Amino acid sequence: MMKPRVRFAPSPTGALHIGGLRTALYNYLFARKHGGTFILRIEDTDQGRYVPGAEDYIIEALKWTGLVPDEGVGFGGQNGPYRQSDRKDTYQQYAHALVQSGHAYYAFDTPEALDAQRQSIDNFTYNHTTRDGLSNSLTLGDAASQQRVDAGEPFVIRLKVLPGREIHIQDLIRGSVVFQSSELDDKVLLKADGMPTYHLANIVDDHLMNITHVIRGEEWLPSTAHHVLLYEGFGWSDTMPQFAHLPLIMKPVGNGKLSKRDGAKFGMPVFPLNWKGETDEDSFEGFREAGFLPEAVVNFLALLGWHPGNDQEIFSMEALMEAFTIENIGKSGARFDFEKAKWFNQKYIQALDTEALAARVRPLVAAKGYRTNAEYLEKAVGLMQERATVLPDFVETGYYLFEPVKSYEADAVQKKWNAAMAPFMAELIQVLHDFEPFLTLPLEEMVKKIMQEKGLKPGDVMPLLRIALVGTMKGPAVFDTAVVLGRDETIQRLQTFLQYVVDLQ
Ligand code: GLU
């Protein structure tokens, strides 16, 4: 295959939805697999929907997940500028050229005149049936229209769609898709304020940036009909990119596509990073802040619509680049399964060595104000590694590795405590003071011995030891925990617990 050039072309209208990130990922993987180029283009021509901060958010989300563009806003490149608001002049030239070649026309209808049409005609659209009765260069003639344009009268440029044609596209995912030109409206290409619409800017840029494949969400499929006509109008049909329209991402349950509101509804992130909007309703939690590893998010997203053709589930980015093909993208919606996202995260947490894991957990430890050294942190995360699903588990569930136990599971203490425990614990504390080596197995042997001497069973002792050390019945293995906490802390906790129980009596 010729080296592909693909683009991710988000509009900065708010936080980048997880579905947008999947689009970026598939573009990235396709480019990487074939040694091609991945471009970030910011489609910000709709001033009304522009949201400050959204562009930075997009860039940060791409960097976080490692989807670093070869060219684009914030990344340099020879085909820029890559922000559409910086390319206004280009679009104007192309729009006017399309009028010259007869594929587009000027329209002077005022907003009021169009409103009047909408009032009198049900489902009014500006198209081959209505345009003859409206104020445009087709009805006014070229000379009169040019005069109006030269006189500074406001105008838009519309695509002239001829009826009676079948427009075929060969979508790489959906196969052959046919549109009837009679059903298409005469889309505005250039607005009265001189800004292009999405359609014009998108096509001009895909052409000028030599895009070979357009991989984007399925919601853009209907636009493709107009896009094909634009390519024709410009005389660029030969270099028209190939299209691949990705399946929807569906809600975790029920029908319909995943929406940004589903995050709050189902208690899960649907954005890569936190987003602070104007209101709480418009603010969203990100996968990053929820404690997901970017490689887990990438793996999860890759399989949300694409399948490897076998039952392999764990894919590093390199493995994805190798395995990814457009042919294996599904047509039907992919269900967003947050449990699965957590499963991936757990797997990726478990696969890290403790040094790397400690590096990921360290910022959370610092944010809590815990003071700990590198060596201790590694031991602590190693102890919790098997039980953690998201990074905050290390400092929330596992807080007791960084500060004293805050509370004991009272019911369990009640149930398990018996008169023989006090002398047992007292003796254990005594022995621990100079017990060597302070390691899991020797500790276990030693405790067993004392238990036997006192006629106690593991079922009597172990739950209480665990509660003493971590406050709850759930938690890592008791002696491993003691080793991580160290001799002094272990003794301290046993004493504190003993005191607590004595006070209870
Ligand atoms: N600006 C469009 C978006 O926000 C781009 C669609 C496309 O990739 O053509 O998704």
Image (spheres, helix red, strand yellow):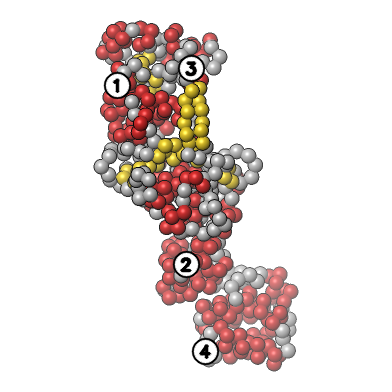
Residue at coordinates 35% horizontally, 33% vertically from top-left?
Answer: 239
Q: Position of residue 255 (x, y in %)?
A: 63, 39
Task: Compare marks 3 and 1 and give the one earlier in the sequence.
Answer: 1
Element assignment for label 3:
loop
Q: CA distance from mark 1 to mark 2?
A: 57 Å
Q: Mark 2 = which residue?
A: 352
Q: Quadrant of residue 387?
A: bottom right
Q: CA distance from mark 3 to mark 2?
A: 60 Å
Q: Position of residue 360 (x, y in %)?
A: 44, 63
Three-letter residue code for mark 3: Gly
Q: Position of residue 267 (x, y in %)?
A: 58, 49
Give the class, few, some or many, for how many residues have Cα within 10 Å of label 3's Cα (few <14, many ≥20): few
Q: Quadrant of the N terminus?
A: top left
Q: CA distance from mark 2 to mark 4?
A: 28 Å
Element assignment for label 4:
loop
The disc placed on residue 97 is 1
Instruction: Return the residue found at the far front.
Output: 1
Three-letter residue code for mark 4: Pro
Task: Compare marks 3 and 2 and give the one earlier in the sequence.
Answer: 3
Element assignment for label 1:
helix
The disc placed on residue 437 is 4
Q: Quadrant of the C terminus?
A: bottom right
Q: Please determine whether, in this image, residue 127 is positioned above or below residue 335.
A: above
Q: Quadrant of residue 235?
A: top left
